C-alpha cells in the first residue's frame, strides 16, 4: 500500500521544481525571438546600435538560459526517482517526446547558443542572424516536445494499455503529436513566453529611460518590445480561450473546478467572476456572477451546457463500478496471462480501468469495495476547486492587465511621448513580475486541475509515486528548495548587475534630456 | 548564373514552405498558426524599430530645416 504522505511529498517536490524551472523558461522562449527581431533590424539596416541592443539583451538571455537548463535537467530524473511506477506504466509513450526533445531541440539550441554568443566576430551578419533564429527555433521546439509529453498526461491519445506487458504502449506517434490538447497547449505556452520577454524588455528599458541612461538603446528596445508584446498578449488570450475550449471536452472535471461549478444548470450558464468555493459543502460563498457568460466562453454558444461537479461525480461513480471488473481481470491476468475469460472481461471494461484504480486506494481488493468507498473515490475524481478557481482567475486578470498595459504602451511609443510619461515608465518597471506570476498560475491550473490523475482517466496519482520513505522525501525536498532558491538569488543578482552595468559599449550612460544627439546615436555609428 | 541559382534555391524553399503549410494546415492547424503568428510578431516588432529610426530621422530633418529658415 502506498504511503500517501510520500505521494503528497513527491507531488510537492515536483510542483516546486517545476514552478522554479518555469520561472526561467518563458523568458527564454520569448527572448530568443525578441533577439531575432532585434538582430533582423541590424542585418537589414546595418545600424550598429541594433547590434549593441542584440548583444546586451543576449547577455541577459544567456544568464536566464543557463539557469533554466540547470533547473530543468533535474526534473527529467525526478520522473525516474520519485515517479517510478508512472515511468514504467507510461514510459513507452512519455519517454519518446522527451528523448526527441533532448536529441533534437535541446542539442539544437545548446549548440547554436554558443555560436550566437561567441560568433559575432567570426560569422557574417547574415550567418549570425540565421544562428539566432535557430536558437529561437530550438528553444521553442524544446517546449513543443515537452508540452507534447505533458499533453499526453492531460489527454492520453495515441496509446493503449497492453495487459500482456502491463504497460501503456504507443499506437500512433502522429496522434500524440497532433493531439488538440498538445497543439493548443504549445501555442498558448510558447506565446505566453513571448509576453514574458516583452514585459521584461519593456520594463528594463523603462528603468533606463527613468534613469536617463542608455536612452538610445532603451527607446528602441521599448518600442520593439511593446509591439512584440501587444500582439503576443492578444494571441495568448485568444489561444487560452482555445485551450479552454479543447480542455472542456478533454477534462470536464478541470473545467468545473476552474469555474467553481458545483451543479449543472440549464443554459445559458452564468460565469462566476468571484466566488469562494467550499470543497466540503460543494457550494460557493459570495458569488458575483456575469449572466450567460460561461456558456459563451466555454461552448461559444448561448445554448451550450457545461457539466457541474454533481453530474461529474455521478459519472465517476458509474465509471468506477464499470472499472472494477477490469482491475479484477487484470489481477487474474498478472497471475495467468493466457486466461481467456479474464482477457474478455478486461477488454469489455478496459476503458474504465483507471477509474477502477481510483477505488483501489480505499479497497485493495476492488471486488469487495463498498458503496461508501466508491463514493469517496468518486469525490476524489474532482480536483481541489478553490486553488484551481483562483489561480485561473488570477492568470486571466493578469493577462487582461498586460493587454491594457501594452495597448497604452503602443499608443505612447508610436506617438513618441513615452519618455514624458514618467508614471507609465514606473508602471512598466513594476510590470516585470506580472507575466511570471501569470505563467506560474497557468501551470497550477493545468496540473492541479488534472488531479487525481497523473494520466487523465488512466493512471491515478496515488499509484504513480515511488515507494520512498518520508524522511528521504523531506531531505530531498529541502535539498531541492535550498538549491533552487540559491539559483534564483544568483540569477537575480547577475541580472540586476548586468542591467545596472548596461551594454558594454563604451557609451555612457547618462544622456542630457534625450537630446537629438542621443536620439541619433544609432546613425552616428550606423 | 549565381542569381539564377539563388532564384532556384528560393523557389525550392517557397515550394517546401507551401508543402509544409498544406500538411500542417490540415493536420496541425494550431502549429501552423504558431509559425505564421510568430513570423508576424517578429517582423512587426522589427518594423517598429525601423519606424522609430525613421521618425527620429524625419524629426532631425525637420529641426534642421527650421534652423535653416531661421
Image (tube, rainbow, N blue to C red):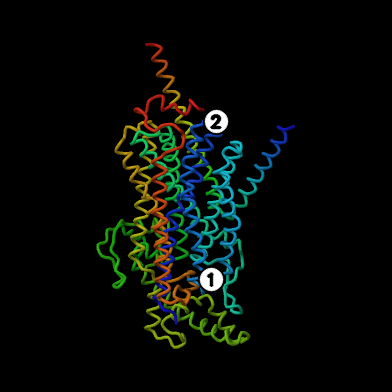
Placement of the N terminus of chain A among the 4 image quadrants? bottom left
Could you tell me if the residues under marks 2 and 1 are in contact, i.e. CB atoms within 8 Å? no
The tally of labels here is 2
Q: Residue furthest right?
A: B1
User: Nearest the camera: B19 or A89?
Assistant: A89
Residue A350's disc is none
Q: Quadrant of residue A519?
A: top left
Residue A434 pos. (x, y %): 36, 50
Q: Real-space Cα distance between discs 2 and 1?
A: 51 Å
Q: Is residue A246 above or below residue A320?
A: above
Q: Residue furthest front?
A: A506
Name the residue tied to disc 1: A87
Residue A421 pos. (x, y %): 31, 35
Residue A416 pos. (x, y %): 38, 31
Name the side, left or right, on which A8 lies relative to A118: left
Mark 2 belongs to chain: A
Q: Is residue A363 above or below residue A242?
A: below
Name the residue tied to disc 2: A46
Amino acid at each position: 500500500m502506498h504511503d500517501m504522505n510520500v505521494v503528497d511529498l513527491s507531488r510537492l517536490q515536483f510542483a516546486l521544481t517545476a514552478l522554479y524551472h518555469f520561472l526561467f523558461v518563458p523568458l527564454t522562449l520569448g527572448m530568443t525571438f525578441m533577439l531575432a527581431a532585434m538582430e533582423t533590424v541590424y542585418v537589414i539596416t546595418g545600424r550598429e546600435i541594433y547590434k549593441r541592443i542584440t548583444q546586451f539583451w543576449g547577455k541577459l538571455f544567456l544568464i536566464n538560459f543557463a539557469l533554466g537548463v540547470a533547473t530543468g535537467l533535474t526534473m527529467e530524473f525526478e520522473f525516474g526517482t520519485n515517479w517510478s511506477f508512472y515511468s514504467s506504466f507510461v514510459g513507452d509513450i512519455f519517454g519518446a517526446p522527451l528523448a526527441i526533445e533532448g536529441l533534437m531541440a535541446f542539442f539544437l539550441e545548446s549548440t547554436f547558443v554558443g555560436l550566437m554568443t561567441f560568433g559575432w566576430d567570426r560569422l557574417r551578419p547574415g550567418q549570425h542572424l540565421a544562428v539566432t533564429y535557430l536558437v529561437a527555433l530550438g528553444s521553442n521546439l524544446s517546449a513543443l516536445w515537452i508540452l507534447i509529453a505533458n499533453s499526453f498526461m492531460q489527454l492520453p491519445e495515441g496509446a493503449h494499455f497492453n495487459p500482456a506487458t502491463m504497460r501503456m504502449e504507443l499506437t500512433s506517434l502522429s496522434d500524440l503529436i497532433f493531439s488538440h490538447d498538445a497543439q493548443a497547449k504549445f501555442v498558448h505556452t510558447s506565446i505566453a513566453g513571448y509576453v514574458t520577454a516583452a514585459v521584461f524588455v519593456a520594463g528594463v528599458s523603462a528603468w533606463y529611460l527613468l534613469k536617463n541612461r542608455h536612452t538610445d538603446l532603451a527607446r528602441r528596445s521599448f518600442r520593439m518590445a511593446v509591439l512584440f508584446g501587444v500582439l503576443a498578449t492578444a494571441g495568448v488570450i485568444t489561444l487560452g480561450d482555445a485551450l479552454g475550449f479543447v480542455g472542456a471536452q478533454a477534462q470536464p472535471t478541470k473545467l468545473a473546478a476552474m469555474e467553481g461549478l458545483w451543479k449543472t444548470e440549464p443554459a445559458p450558464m452564468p460565469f462566476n467572476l468571484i466566488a469562494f468555493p467550499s470543497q466540503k459543502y460543494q457550494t460557493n460563498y459570495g458569488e458575483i456572477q456575469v449572466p450567460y457568460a460561461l456558456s459563451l466562453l466555454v461552448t461559444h454558444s448561448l445554448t451550450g451546457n457545461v457539466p457541474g461537479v454533481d453530474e461529474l461525480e455521478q459519472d465517476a461513480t458509474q465509471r468506477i463500478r464499470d472499472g472494477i471488473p477490469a482491475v479484477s481481470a487484470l489481477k487474474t491476468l498478472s497471475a495467468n496471462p493466457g486466461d481467456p475469460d479474464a482477457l474478455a472481461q478486461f477488454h469489455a471494461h478496459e476503458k474504465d480501468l483507471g477509474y477502477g484504480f481510483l477505488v483501489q486506494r480505499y479497497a485493495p481488493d476492488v471486488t469487495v469495495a463498498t458503496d461508501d468507498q466508491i463514493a469517496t473515490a468518486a469525490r476524489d475524481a474532482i480536483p481541489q476547486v478553490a486553488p484551481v478557481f483562483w489561480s485561473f482567475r488570477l492568470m486571466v486578470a493578469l493577462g487582461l492587465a498586460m493587454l491594457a498595459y501594452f495597448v497604452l504602451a503602443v499608443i505612447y511609443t508610436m506617438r513618441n511621448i513615452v519618455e514624458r510619461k514618467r508614471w507609465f515608465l514606473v508602471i512598466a518597471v513594476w510590470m516585470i513580475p506580472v507575466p511570471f506570476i501569470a505563467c506560474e498560475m497557468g501551470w497550477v491550473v493545468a496540473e492541479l486541475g488534472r488531479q487525481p490523475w497523473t494520466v487523465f482517466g488512466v493512471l491515478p496519482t496515488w499509484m504513480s509515486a515511488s515507494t520512498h520513505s518520508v524522511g528521504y522525501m523531506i531531505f530531498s525536498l529541502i535539498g531541492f528548495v535550498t538549491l533552487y532558491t540559491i539559483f534564483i538569488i544568483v540569477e537575480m543578482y547577475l541580472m540586476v548587475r548586468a542591467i545596472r552595468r548596461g551594454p558594454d559599449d563604451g557609451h555612457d550612460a547618462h544622456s542630457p534630456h534625450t537630446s537629438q544627439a542621443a536620439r541619433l546615436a544609432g546613425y552616428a555609428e550606423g | 548564373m549565381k542569381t539564377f541559382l539563388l532564384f532556384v534555391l528560393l523557389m525550392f524553399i517557397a515550394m517546401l514552405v507551401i508543402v509544409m503549410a498544406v500538411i500542417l494546415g490540415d493536420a496541425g492547424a494550431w502549429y501552423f498558426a504558431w509559425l505564421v503568428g510568430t513570423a508576424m510578431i517578429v517582423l512587426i516588432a522589427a518594423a517598429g524599430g525601423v519606424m522609430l529610426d525613421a521618425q527620429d530621422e524625419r524629426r532631425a530633418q525637420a529641426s534642421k530645416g527650421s534652423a535653416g529658415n531661421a
